[in-house]
Amino acid sequence: MRVLVTGAAGFIGSSVSHALLARGDEVIGIDNLNDYYDVSLKEARLARLTPQNGFTFRKLDVSDQSGVLKLAEDFPDIDGVVHLAAQAGVRYSLINPYSYVTSNVMGQVVMLELARKLSGLKHFVYASSSSVYGGNNKAPFSVDDPVERPISLYAATKRTDELFGYTYAHLFGITCTGLRFFTVYGPWGRPDMAAFLFTKAIMAGEPIRVFNHGEMWRDFTYIDDIVSGVVRTLDRPAQGVPPCKVYNLGGDKVEKLTDYIGHIEKALGRKAIMQLEPLQPGDVPATSADIEASRRELGFSPTTPISVGIPKFVEWYRSYHR
């Protein structure tokens, strides 16, 4: 396959690109390398990809209409799109909502317009988020649950992405699948995520901020399991009328945040100084993924518990920071 991967210098995008290249696919990666977090980390991820046969990179923002649509002229035989580029982060969306509308909403529309120009496109896979479930009190979260009451601006943009995906599938027959990711972590992860923040602070002997006074539960999902789910999805174009699906990609067990911290402490051989704080605006106390449809239709089966994944992350963190 010839696959266009957006956000190719990002955490999930770079990992998916490696997996596709490893199985012999050609990957065209695009990323704007913005400074939402340390650009050197993005460049380091990209540096691992660029020497590989079959990888082509373009520095490009997904909201750049002319730049993105020109890809249809330069690479007309793209037959798969994995659209992972987005402005991430629940809390930052309260500070800079414009960035989320530009990257997540306009970016989705521009990418779907590109899909319309790719006559040989078989599947358009894009990233959604568990945040779309908002304050849902029913657990686990099912793709059949209502998702019309987002409680963060980030969640609102990701739900909008799903609605655009459905509409383009209905109007233009573009085969679309959205993936609701649940708290992804692992080597090469984002610096604004819990594993990175906690590891950095504990190593420095600094306090870590633990929200909702520690009463937080998450469906932590290791990066290798997410990558497997994304690739399996790409290989299984949505069926039906319209040809549009949404799946949960989450771990197999809900973990309490303090237990997650405990595994980081164990891997580091140091205790954390916990600074207990209230629940933050836009945040939710618990997430839990119902992945039965993903198991049945995608063959998705997460295999990495946090007792294995956290030590792998800490090992990478120490190596990356020398």
Image (cartoon, rainbow, N blue to C red):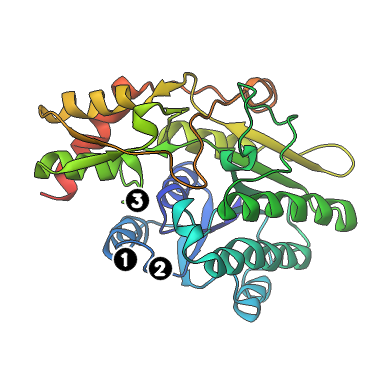
Of the two numbered discs 3 and 2 in the rendering, the one whose residue sits closer to the viewer: 3
SS of the residue under disc 2:
loop
The answer to whether residue 60 is above or below residue 266 is: below
Tell me if residue 242 comes above or below residue 258 in the rendering.
Answer: below
Q: Where is residue 290 in the image (x, y as percent from the top left)?
A: 62, 23
Amino acid type of the residue tagged 3 in the rendering: Asp
User: Alpha carbon of mark 1 to alpha carbon of mark 2: how far?
Assistant: 6 Å
Task: Kindly identify which residue carries mark 3.
Answer: 192
Could you say which disc has been placed on residue 87 in the image?
Answer: none
Picture disc at residue 39: 1
Find the distance from the CA under tag 3 to the CA under tag 2. 16 Å
Residue at disc 1, secondary structure: helix
Ranked by sequence position, the earlier of labels 1 and 3 is 1
Residue 129 position by quadrant: top right
* Residue that carries the numbered disc 2 in the rendered image: 33
Q: Which amino acid does label 2 sit on?
A: Leu
- Is the residue under label 2 in contact with that under label 3 (CB below 8 Å)? no
Question: Which residue appears at 53% of the width and 55% of the height?
Answer: 26
Residue 233 point in image, percent of width and height: 63, 37
Is residue 164 shown left or right of residue 63? right
The residue under label 1 is which amino acid type?
Val
Give the residue at x 54% y 53%.
84
| Residue at (61% x, 66% y) in the render | 101
Mark 1 in CB contact with mark 2 (< 8 angstroms): yes
Where residue 164 appears, x then y in whole percent? 76, 56
Tag in front: 1 or 3: 3
* Distance between mark 1 and mark 3 Cα atoms: 13 Å
Front residue of 64/138: it is 138
